[in-house]
Amino acid sequence: MPDYPEDLKYSVDHEWVRQGNELTVRVGVTAYATEQLGDIVYVSLPAVGDSVDSGDACGELESTKSVSDVLSPVAGTVSAINPLLEGSPETVNGDPYGDGWLFELEIDKDTDLDDLLDADAYAESVAS
């Protein structure tokens, strides 16, 4: 079983959230998700300025096996997308918690990231 970074929060849908400054979070998919998907060959991301709600499909990961929706783990406004993925979608597989991040969101000051899973709870959810 892969290790899940302790500094992240996780959704049951296999996305992770890393808090940047107080109102910015970076979103990506977990190593577990990339293992299930296989080699990612195309990434579709939301546009900067798009508003997303928690649980909304806001992008897609296309792999050699299937196409899978990216679900936003929290509500917010897209403030950045990862430009590296346009030419190198496989970066999501190779470095899911680093260079393979997907997008950043500006979140509401009352967004509670503690509603998401910590690393131990996420590891338990994928083990069961």
Image: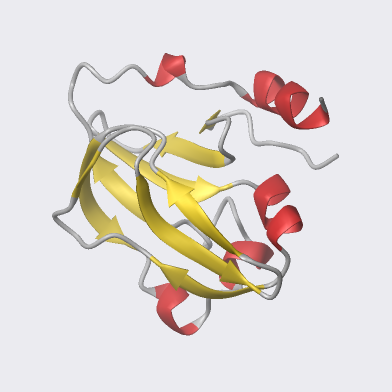
Q: Nearer the viewer, residue 20 or 114?
A: 114
What residue lies at 26% left-to-right and 58% top-to-bottom? 80
Q: Nearer the viewer, residue 76 or 13?
A: 13
Q: Position of residue 11 (x, y in %)?
A: 53, 31
Q: Position of residue 17 (x, y in %)?
A: 45, 37
On the rendered image, what quadrant is the N terminus found in? top right
Q: Nearer the viewer, residue 2 or 58?
A: 58
Q: Is residue 128 above or below residue 3?
A: above
Q: Quadrant of residue 103?
A: bottom left
Q: Relative to residue 120, is residue 91 drawn left or right? A: left
Q: Position of residue 40 (x, y in %)?
A: 62, 71
Seen as rendered, the residue at the extreme right is 1
Q: Relative to residue 81, is residue 5 drawn left or right? A: right
What residue lies at 64% left-to-right and 36% top-to-bottom? 5
* Color style of the picture: secondary structure
Q: Is residue 12 above or below residue 62?
A: above
What residue lies at 62% left-to-right and 46% top-to-bottom? 30
Q: Is residue 93 above or below residue 107?
A: below
Q: Nearer the viewer, residue 51 or 79?
A: 51
What residue lies at 43% left-to-right and 74% top-to-bottom? 84
Q: Relative to residue 75, is residue 98 drawn left or right? A: right
Seen as rendered, the residue at the extreme left is 49
Q: Quadrant of residue 90?
A: bottom right
Q: Position of residue 38 (x, y in %)?
A: 73, 66
